C-alpha cells in the first residue's frame, strides 16, 4: 500500500471512530492540533506491524522487533513515558498472539466473539486512551467502558467489509474463518446473533446510564443497523463468488 493510500485509510479510520468529535468536545480542532500527526504516525507504525504479520507466514524476531521499536518511538512522541509502553500496549500484544496462533492452526473461532473482538480493537483503544490523556475532561464524559459496544460493532463491520480483501492474506478475520471451518450460513446466523447481542447490551447500558451514555449508544445502534445490512449484502455477493473456495487456499 502506498503512503498516500495508507494515510487515507487512517483518515477514514479516525473519522469512523469519531476522533474529530472527541477533539471538538474538548474545544480543539482535530485537523490543526499537533497531536493528530503523532496519532497518525502511531497508527502507521501499528499498520506496518499488522501488514508484516499478514504477509509473512514465517516471522523473524528481528523484523518484529523493528516494527515494535517504531511503535514505541511513536508512543513516546505521543507523550507516553517509556516505563508505561508495555502497559499501554498490552492489548496489542494479546491480539498479536491471536494472529501468531494462526501459524499453529489455532483459529479465532475457538474464542468467544466478544472476547476476540475486544482485543481486535486494540489499536483504537490505545489511540483513544492517548487522546483522553491529553484531554482528561473527556474521560469523565465518555469513559472507556462506554465505548465497548461501539468498538465491538465497528470491528465486526471491518471484518465483514474486508471479506474479499482478507481472503488473500494471513489474518484473523473471524467471519471468514468461520465461513470456511463451519459453513457460510452458520457464519451468517452467528454474526447476526452477535450483532443483536451487541444492540441489546448497548440498550441495557443506555437504560442504566441514561443521557450521559446517549451519544455512544446512538453511534452504536446506527453501526449495528449498518453492519446488519452489510452482512446480508456481502454474504450474498460472497456466495455468488464462491468465496469459500478462495478462502480455503489461504487457511
Image (cartoon, helix red, strand yellow):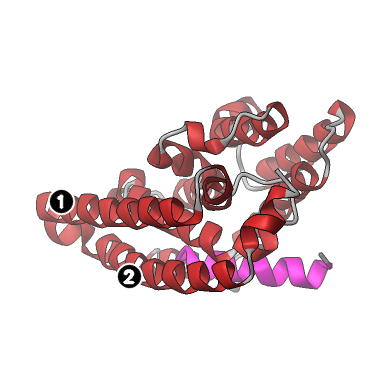
Please check the rendered image and state whether residue 232 is part of the magenta-colored stretch, yes or no: no
Q: Residues within 10 Å of mark 2 (few under 14, many from 20)?
A: some
Res 27 visible: no
Percent across and percent down for residue 233 are: 47, 74
Horizontal arrangement in the rendering, residue 211 relative to residue 215 (left or right)? left
Q: Which mark lies nearer to you, 1 or 2?
A: 2
In the image, 228 versus 182, the foreground residue is 182
- Describe the element under mark 1 as helix, strand or loop: helix
Q: Give the extent of the magenta segment.
A: 2-19
In the image, 139 versus 234, the foreground residue is 234
In the image, 248 versus 18, the foreground residue is 248
Q: Quadrant of residue 203?
A: bottom left
Quarter of the rendering occupied by the C terminus: top right
- Describe the element under mark 2 as helix, strand or loop: helix
Q: Which residue is mark 1?
A: 204
Q: Which mark is residue 225?
A: 2
What residue sits 22% from the left and 49% below the top? 201
Of pointers 1 and 2, the one earlier in the residue sequence? 1
Percent across and percent down for residue 223 are: 37, 67
Q: Quadrant of residue 61?
A: top right
Q: Main secondary structure of the magenta part?
A: helix
In the image, 165 versus 237, the foreground residue is 237
Horizontal arrangement in the rendering, residue 191 relative to residue 193 (left or right)? right
What residue sits 79% from the left and 72% below the top? 4
Percent across and percent down for residue 162 are: 60, 63
Horizontal arrangement in the rendering, residue 219 relative to residue 62 (left or right)? left
What residue sits 41% from the left and 35% below the top? 112
Percent across and percent down for residue 30 are: 54, 70
Amino acid at each position: 500500500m502506498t503512503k498516500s493510500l495508507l494515510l487515507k485509510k487512517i483518515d477514514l479510520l479516525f473519522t469512523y471512530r469519531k476522533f474529530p468529535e472527541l477533539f471538538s468536545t474538548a474545544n480543539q480542532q482535530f485537523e490543526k492540533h499537533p497531536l493528530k500527526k503523532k496519532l497518525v504516525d502511531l497508527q502507521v507504525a501499528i499498520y506496518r506491524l499488522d501488514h508484516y504479520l499478514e504477509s509473512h507466514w514465517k516471522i523473524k524476531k528481528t523484523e518484529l522487533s523493528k516494527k515494535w521499536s517504531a511503535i514505541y518511538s511513536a508512543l513516546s512522541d505521543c507523550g507516553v513515558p517509556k516505563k508505561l509502553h508495555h502497559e499501554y500496549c498490552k492489548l496489542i500484544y494479546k491480539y498479536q498472539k491471536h494472529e501468531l496462533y494462526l501459524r499453529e492452526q489455532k483459529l479465532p473461532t475457538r474464542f468467544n466473539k466478544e472476547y476476540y473482538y475486544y482485543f481486535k480493537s486494540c489499536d483504537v483503544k490505545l489511540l483513544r486512551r492517548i487522546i483522553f490523556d491529553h484531554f482528561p475532561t473527556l474521560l469523565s464524559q465518555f469513559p472507556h467502558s462506554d465505548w465497548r459496544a461501539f468498538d465491538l460493532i465497528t470491528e465486526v463491520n471491518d471484518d465483514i467489509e474486508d471479506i474479499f480483501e482478507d481472503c488473500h492474506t494471513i489474518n484473523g478475520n473471524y467471519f471468514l474463518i468461520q465461513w470456511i471451518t463451519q459453513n457460510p450460513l452458520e457464519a451468517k446466523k452467528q454474526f447476526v446473533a452477535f450483532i443483536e447481542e451487541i444492540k441489546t447490551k448497548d440498550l441495557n447500558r443506555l437504560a442504566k446510564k441514561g443521557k450521559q451514555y446517549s451519544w455512544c449508544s446512538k453511534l452504536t445502534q446506527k453501526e449495528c443497523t449498518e453492519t446488519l445490512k452489510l452482512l446480508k449484502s456481502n454474504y450474498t455477493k460472497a456466495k455468488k463468488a464462491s468465496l469459500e473456495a478462495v478462502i480455503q487456499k489461504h487457511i
